[in-house]
């Protein structure tokens, strides 16, 4: 994946930043691909002329542990790669329990949340040491802790499209579609084109599906 | 991974800190880069290797950090700019060469050592601050506070190294190395230098060039001179700056990742006019006059840094030398307990420390929300432990080891090492591993345990190490075991990759860092050359592997080796994109929780692809996570797990 | 004291690691956690269950002997030397070939052949030697297969593992040839039938074997390997006192060892066993001291009487009166075993009311230790 193209700094983007810095957390399970997703979104944001800092937890965490990307979006300021407790503005959860974990630490009354409704059971759960809450309970709780929630069954939709890995791009579509970020369809296309030169069509379909899934929720 | 050699000066790219360091080296005209994979440093060499051919440089994955630094020094001695990068443990490994290198001096090519620390040991065995080694060994040290500085400092350090004739160090941490930010690019050099080891150092005296640390009275004194030269430059370095009022209620002195944390913390408290921040980028030698100057700005000084009180002590030393009538500030930091003396920091931690010093309230989120969020997350968020990936050979290996040790019945133990398989300390590997220290540590410890027979010791000893670890550190210890006739079995977990750090190649994989094919160095051939009994097993053949281990343990005597050979699943699936088997659970055969099974597959074996269906009270395969290795079909006592070849 | 069922960890602590395990096999073969390996029972992982059938059926966890005796015979445990006796005779297989292959009189082989031939059982769970003379459980389904398993090598064999492995849904009627401790385990299984393994209601016949002690397979097999060419051995024998010999017969003749060498391989748990004549079998079979080629047979239950009647009627089994002298010796030997064992147990526990795994009435204990 290359970071090609000139990223102009300082231009005002087509979609304005509602808050500066805007804090996005992408949360999931090691191996789901949150790092690639944060890069994709980051690239798109930088193309819009914004300053972006992305903090990652990876390395050992990849082995099935909880991972998160902290995306700081600002017009001019360089931010630290950490979002402080209680200061997330947008949460993109690739897994329901991880979404709730994020809201527990970083949520606040104004946070908006997009969540993939497919569970990934930790070995603590499958081993019988811990309980995984029901999906209804999880979504209710996530809803209680967010100003607005968009549940998306991205994995199932991706399987319908032929490959579960497309879930990630569906979620990006959902994130863009819900309007929480200063991005629209047009801003993502060049980044998708660059990331997936071979499978562009499949990924564009997945991306648009994600937009559709949230717009349908009103 | 980003293309770090993109030829577009003046443009802005999104780089992780490591990519920015690689870019800085390229802009400096680095010719030779060597490293051993280690989180959070691996991407430095990864990104240089991926552009090496095109950029006309040489990049190498060395067998260990010591050889990497020695090789880089060799290039420097021949006039080529060279860099060695590593994690904090690598700095330990190079320490003997490094201290002597400081005495001998570097060569005509600037030489830079990059050490990446991992505060909170997120991906490490230990947490360690490498900055003090600069003070200990007399090495000029810089630490970047931003992605731009990662590039700019690295670029500058090559110049500094050449000017002073000594190795220079850049220290980074995970939150800079792996975080991504905007970097404005500089120019790339057009041509490389010619390598030549100049035989005559000083043309007038015709003295032969010698890189030797003796006599120490001369060389050590010279090292101090170089350091003092560095310090003078640091006094006016653009990498140090101050923001804030002339007279402040609080002066923060900080460096590295903590600059942005401090900045954000002050902003969150809304006290930018009251608090000044002295950001230091040149950490050793400390620019003492600069520090003295700023110590006068406030009566209270808060030292913010990761991990040890390195700057704190250095600044306190400076403060102690101030004239008797100077106002002595009160120092806050790790000594006072305002900042933790272990673990990584973040803006909240710093903000709370500032608030505590100034007697302010640190803004938290809405209290009612906070209470609700804590309660709900506490109730409904189960733990998520790390484990081996689905399809990982280590799970099968440790299952066989567990059973073999139990069947053998002599309370055998496993000494461990560094890699994905370190997780065998926990439930992922059925708690089999009992010791873990450093690369090669396991087989070293086994050498000791294997010579205790005269003291009545009769427990079988297995030492596990990975294939990359074998080449890094295990070979001398294995030779020791043969030569001194120690009774242990070395179990080499050969998954054909340096997996934990990102699947880098090594001497056993037949590929170099730049993708060239090269001869495979056979682990078992090396062992056989030592006269050691070697068995090669496929860990997925649980029965065969278990019986091989039992036989080996029954043999006793000198060191023996078992190679567990099966490719890392992430490497295989990335290449093949298929699953060998479709695996499913037959719910009619699965007995589930009854006495007779008690959920062996999910409760004990614990592959993430095996989940427990709470409603049906049966095991089930998660088809998205399952990689189709089929091993679970062999452990189900009822034969309820069915595998069908695809 | 009521029988408290515990789990595999307690089985490990109280029985296996405490040196009480007799290798009967009752805990092995029904779950993935307990396995038998080279003469030891090994717990590979804990099932984490608080109560387990492994503990419940083990003949070395607490047993209320009265309860077991009532279930089997309808009467409390009296502590008689030979247990409950309906009839006691001498017997031998009518077929010389069988007698040559088997131990002593070949009575066990004859009884099983009859049971299989007449359709009383479909399969018999017995001990069979592998090629290198390691004993293991075997399910025999024909007279030939039974004959093939004849003979004893005096090593403990986890025969009940073979019983455990019979699938729940199998409708085969079964016989088992069991040592005294194995008979006790089977009695415990009948008391609390298992739900997830063999249907114990299918067990129609328990043939007990007299037993003074059993040899540790691990230690004794090593001794045999070091001193004999095992595949060439035809059979083993321990002749009655005062021979003090252990004999191994090959095609070319007999090799003998001092019995003391063999005694060092006896499992220590055997010293704590009160049962010499398999008191909880349907019919128990042993040797006849001083009379070669015959077995002593003790018939105990209706099922035992039934198979004896069929065997006599079929002509496959010859019986004769057991000489009174032999009966007296047998009773005395059996009594002494009880007394020695009780003394060992009470020495270990320091009290007559703590008998480790035995729940015996005080009256029985006092009478035996008088």
Image: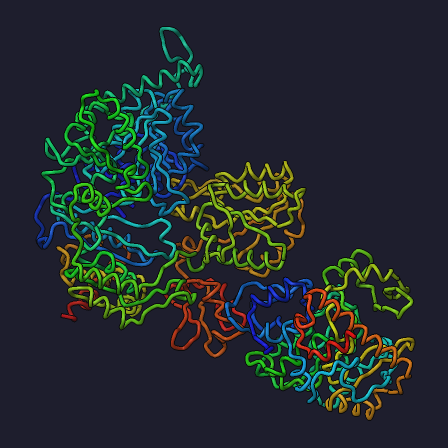
In-image side of C303 versus C97 (left or right) = left
Q: Nearer the viewer, residue B87 or B183?
A: B87
Relative depth, front residue between B72 and C99:
C99
Q: Is residue A210 visible?
A: yes
Q: Is residue B90 above or below residue C59?
A: above
Picture layout, residue A64 above or below residue B513: below
Q: Residue B241 in the image: x percent, y percent? A: 17, 31
Position of C95 relative to B370 (above/below): below
Q: Give the quarter of the image for residue C289.
A: bottom right
Measured as percent of width and height from the top left, residue B185 is found at: 20, 36
Relative side of A187 to B502, left or right = left
Look at the image and name its color scheme.
rainbow
Answer left or right for C77 relative to A7. Answer: right
From what the image shows, is residue A100 above or below residue B79?
below
Residue A126 position, x and y percent, is: 41, 66
State the residue at coordinates (90%, 84%). C324
**Residue found farthest to the top:** B204
Q: On the image, which quarter does residue C299 sit in?
A: bottom right
Marker count (numbered) = 0
Please indicate, yes or no, whether residue B28 appears anywhere in the rendered image: no
Q: Quadrant of the C terminus of chain B?
A: bottom left
Can you give x and y, in whole percent of width and height, for residue B55 in the image?
Answer: 30, 35
**What residue is rendered at 8% in x and 53% in y?**
A16
- Report whether C311 appears left or right of B61: right
């Amino acid at each position: 994946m290359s970071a090609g193209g000139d990223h102009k700094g300082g231009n005002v983007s087509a979609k304005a930043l509602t808050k500066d810095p805007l804090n996005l957390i992408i949360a999931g399970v090691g191996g789901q691909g949150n790092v690639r997703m944060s890069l994709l979104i980051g690239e798109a944001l930088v193309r819009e002329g914004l300053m972006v800092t992305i903090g990652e937890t990876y390395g050992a965490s990849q082995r099935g542990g909880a991972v998160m990307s902290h995306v700081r979006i600002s017009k001019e300021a360089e931010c630290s790669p950490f979002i402080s407790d209680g200061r997330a503005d947008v949460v993109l959860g690739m897994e329901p329990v991880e979404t709730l974990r994020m809201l527990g630490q970083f949520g606040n009354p104004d946070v908006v949340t997009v969540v993939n409704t497919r569970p990934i059971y930790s070995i603590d759960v499958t081993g019988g040491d811990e309980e995984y809450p029901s999906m209804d309970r999880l979504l209710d709780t996530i809803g209680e802790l967010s100003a607005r929630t968009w549940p998306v069954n991205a994995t199932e939709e991706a399987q319908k499209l032929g490959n579960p890995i497309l879930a990630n791009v569906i979620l990006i579509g959902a994130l863009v579609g819900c309007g929480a970020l200063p991005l629209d369809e047009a801003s993502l296309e060049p980044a998708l084109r660059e990331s997936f030169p071979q499978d562009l069509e499949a990924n564009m379909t997945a991306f648009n599906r994600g937009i559709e899934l949230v717009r349908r929720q009103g | 991974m980003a293309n770090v050699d993109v030829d577009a000066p003046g443009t802005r790219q999104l780089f992780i800190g490591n990519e920015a360091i690689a870019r800085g080296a390229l802009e400096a005209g680095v010719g030779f880069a060597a490293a051993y994979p280690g989180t959070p440093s691996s991407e430095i060499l990864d990104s240089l290797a991926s552009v090496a051919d095109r950029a006309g440089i040489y990049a190498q994955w060395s067998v260990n950090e010591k050889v990497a630094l020695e090789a880089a020094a060799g290039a420097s001695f021949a006039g080529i700019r060279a860099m060695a990068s590593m994690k904090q443990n690598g700095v330990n490994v190079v320490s003997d060469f490094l201290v002597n290198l400081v005495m001998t001096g570097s060569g005509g090519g600037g030489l830079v050592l990059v050490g990446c620390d991992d505060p909170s040991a997120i991906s490490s065995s230990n947490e360690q601050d490498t900055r003090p080694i600069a003070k200990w060994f007399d090495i000029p040290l810089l630490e970047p506070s931003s992605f731009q500085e990662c590039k700019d400092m690295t670029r500058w350090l090559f110049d500094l190294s050449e000017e002073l004739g000594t190795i220079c160090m850049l220290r980074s941490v995970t939150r800079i190395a792996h975080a991504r930010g905007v970097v404005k690019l500089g120019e790339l050099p057009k041509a490389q230098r010619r390598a030549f080891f100049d035989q005559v150092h000083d043309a007038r005296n015709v003295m032969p060039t010698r890189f030797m640390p003796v006599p120490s009275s001369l060389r050590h004194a010279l090292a101090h001179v170089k350091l003092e030269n560095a310090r003078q430059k640091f006094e006016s370095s653009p990498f140090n700056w101050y923001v804030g009022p002339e007279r402040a209620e609080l002066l923060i002195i900080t460096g590295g990742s903590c600059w942005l944390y401090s900045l954000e913390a002050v902003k969150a408290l809304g006290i930018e006019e009251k608090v000044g921040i002295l950001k230091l980028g040149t950490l050793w030698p400390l620019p003492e006059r600069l520090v003295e100057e700023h110590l006068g700005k406030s009566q209270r000084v808060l030292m913010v840094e990761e991990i040890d009180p390195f700057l704190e002590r250095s600044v306190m030393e400076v403060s102690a030398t101030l004239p008797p009538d100077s106002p002595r500030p009160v120092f806050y930091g790790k000594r006072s307990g305002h900042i933790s003396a272990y673990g990584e920091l973040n803006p909240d931690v710093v903000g709370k420390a500032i608030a505590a010093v100034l007697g302010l309230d640190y803004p938290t989120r809405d209290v009612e929300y906070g209470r609700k969020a804590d309660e709900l997350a506490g109730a409904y968020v189960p733990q998520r432990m790390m484990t081996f990936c689905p399809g990982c050979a280590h799970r099968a290996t440790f299952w066989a080891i567990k059973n073999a040790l139990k069947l053998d019945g002599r309370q055998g133990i496993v000494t461990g090492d560094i890699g994905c398989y370190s997780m065998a300390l926990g439930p992922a590997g059925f708690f089999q591993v009992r010791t873990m220290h450093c690369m090669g540590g396991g087989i070293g410890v086994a050498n000791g345990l294997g010579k205790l027979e005269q003291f009545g010791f009769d427990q079988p000893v297995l030492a596990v190490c990975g294939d990359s670890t074998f080449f890094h550190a295990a070979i001398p210890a294995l030779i020791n075991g043969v030569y001194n006739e120690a009774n242990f079995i070395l179990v080499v977990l050969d998954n054909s990759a340096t997996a934990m750090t990102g699947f880098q190649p090594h001497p056993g994989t037949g590929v170099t860092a730049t993708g060239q094919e090269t001869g495979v160095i056979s682990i078992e051939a090396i062992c056989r050359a030592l006269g050691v009994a070697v068995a090669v097993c496929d860990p997925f053949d649980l029965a065969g592997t278990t019986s091989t281990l039992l036989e080996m343990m029954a043999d006793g005597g000198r060191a023996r080796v078992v190679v567990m050979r099966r490719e890392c699943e992430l490497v295989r699936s990335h290449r093949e994109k298929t699953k060998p088997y479709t695996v499913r659970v037959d719910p009619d055969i699965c007995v589930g929780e009854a006495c007779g099974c008690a959920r062996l597959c999910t409760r004990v074996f614990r592959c993430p692809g095996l989940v427990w269906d709470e409603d049906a009270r049966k095991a089930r395969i998660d088809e998205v996570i399952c990689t189709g290795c089929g091993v679970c079909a062999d452990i189900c006592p009822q034969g309820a797990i069915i595998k069908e070849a695809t | 004291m009521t029988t408290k069922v515990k789990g595999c960890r307690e089985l490990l602590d109280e029985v296996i690691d405490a040196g009480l395990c007799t290798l009967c096999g009752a805990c092995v073969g029904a779950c993935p956690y307990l396995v038998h390996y080279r003469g030891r029972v090994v717990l590979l992982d804990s099932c984490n269950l608080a109560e387990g059938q492994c503990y419940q059926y083990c003949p070395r966890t607490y047993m209320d002997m009265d309860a077991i005796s009532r279930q089997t015979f309808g009467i409390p445990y009296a502590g008689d030397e030979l247990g409950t006796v309906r009839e006691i005779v001498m017997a031998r297989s009518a077929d010389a070939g069988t007698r040559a292959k088997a131990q002593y009189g070949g009575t066990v082989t004859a009884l099983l052949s009859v049971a299989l031939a007449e359709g009383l059982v479909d399969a018999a769970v017995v001990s069979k030697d592998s090629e290198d003379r390691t004993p293991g459980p075997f399910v025999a389904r024909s007279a030939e297969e039974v004959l093939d398993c004849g003979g004893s090598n005096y090593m403990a064999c986890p025969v009940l593992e073979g019983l455990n492995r019979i699938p729940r849904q199998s409708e085969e009627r079964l016989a088992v040839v069991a040592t005294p401790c194995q008979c006790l385990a089977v009695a415990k299984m009948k008391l609390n039938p298992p739900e997830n393994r063999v249907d114990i209601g299918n067990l129609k016949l328990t043939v007990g074997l007299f037993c003074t002690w059993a040899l540790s397979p691990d230690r004794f097999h090593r001794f045999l390997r070091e001193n004999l060419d095992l595949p060439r051995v035809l059979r083993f024998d321990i002749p009655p006192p005062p021979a003090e010999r252990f004999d191994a017969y090959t095609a070319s003749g007999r090799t003998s060892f001092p019995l003391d060498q063999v005694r060092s391989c006896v499992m220590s748990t055997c010293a704590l066993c009160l049962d010499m004549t398999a008191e909880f079998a349907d019919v128990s079979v042993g040797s006849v001291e001083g009379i070669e080629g015959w077995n002593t047979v003790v018939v105990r239950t209706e099922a035992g009487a039934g198979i004896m009647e069929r065997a006599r009627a079929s002509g496959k089994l010859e019986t004769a009166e057991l000489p009174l002298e032999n009966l007296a010796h047998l009773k005395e030997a059996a009594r002494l075993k009880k007394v020695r064992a009780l003394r060992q147990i009470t020495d270990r526990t320091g009290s007559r009311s703590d008998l480790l795994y035995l729940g015996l009435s005080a009256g029985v204990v006092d009478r035996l230790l008088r």
